[in-house]
Every structure is written in structure tokens, then in C-alpha cells.
Image (cartoon, rainbow, N blue to C red):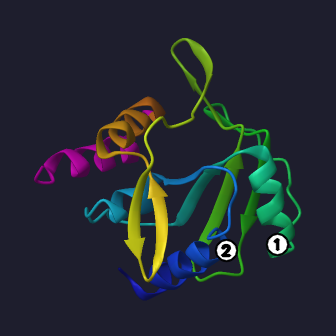
Amino acid sequence: MPRALDETLRALGEALSGATDDWWIIGSAAVALHGARPAAIADVDVLTTPDQARRLAEQWRVAPTPAKPHPLFRSEVYFQQTELPVAVDVMAGFQVNGPDGWRPVWPRSRVAVAYAGAALFVPSRAELIAILELFGRPKDHERAALLRSLPA
């Protein structure tokens, strides 16, 4: 892992070690935690419940803010932690706008990845591929292809 991402993942694992609600890392950081090497990891995306997001925002002393309007994504609760080496985007009540309209993104699988003495949670490889394909952007298709290329 690049040093900045390593430091961020360590801090995230520590911050969420006592979380009472489910949470997952999704996006490019989750692809990396599954063992692939995405071209770039601009941020770490964390998906959780609204209550857990608010608790984490309070812990980090960050005020949830409305996410910028986006035609593809929206969240009930959103904030960004920018004081870590890699920014962390926290989303709760997260939805994606697909062919059938807005639909919630809430993984059914939860895989613990041991990292620096903490458990970091990601969707299963198959479910992460499905989520990335649902997002439908070229970079998401590339990430899904990276996951498919990994040995079983």
C-alpha cells in the first residue's frame, strides 16, 4: 500500500474499531484491500448507517454537509474527513441512480480484512464487482475488471 493510504487505513480502522453499526469500505480502496492494484486511489469511501456516520463525524469533529448535487449519487448523510493523508468520504443512506431510478446501495456481504491489527470491512469480491458495475463509470468498470482478474 502507498504510505498515505496505509496511514489513512490505519486511522480509519482505529476510528471505527468500536462501531456499533455495520460499515464497509467501497470503491478503489476496497479493490486494493481485495488485493488488486487500482491505478489511483483519490479517497477512501466508507458506507455506513446514518447514526454511525453521525457518531464518526462527531468523533472526528467534522460536520456532516450536504454532498454536492450529482446525477448519479446521493446520500442522506455525507461528510469528508480531509485531515488524513488520503481523504475519507463517509456516506450513509447512499443511493445510486441506475436504469430503474434511484436505488439504495447496502451490501449484503461483509468481509473482514485484517489490516495493521484492525478489521477493515469490504463487500465480498463478487458483490463489490456488482456495485462497481452498478456505478457504471469507466473507472468503475476498470476496477471491476481488476477484481475479476485476481485468482480465486
Residue shown at 38% from the left, 64% from the top: 113
Give the residue at mark 2: 15
Q: Nearer the viewer, residue 51 or 97?
A: 51
Q: Secondary structure at mark 2?
A: helix
Specify the principal SS of the magenta part: helix
Magenta region includes residue 147: yes
**Occupied quadrant, residue 2:** bottom left
Q: Is residue 45 above or below residue 68?
A: below
Residue 99, how many percent across, how many down? 51, 14
Q: Are dots 2 and 1 in contact, CB under 8 Å?
A: yes
**Occupied quadrant, residue 115:** bottom left
Number of the label disc, if any, that sits on residue 89: none
Question: Dividing the image into 4 quarters, which one contains the N terminus?
Answer: bottom left
Give the residue at mark 1: 59
Q: Secondary structure at mark 1?
A: helix
Q: Nearer the viewer, residue 144 or 55?
A: 55
Q: Earlier in the sequence, mark 2 or mark 1?
A: 2
- Magenta residues span 136-152
Tell me the amino acid under the disc marked 2: Ala
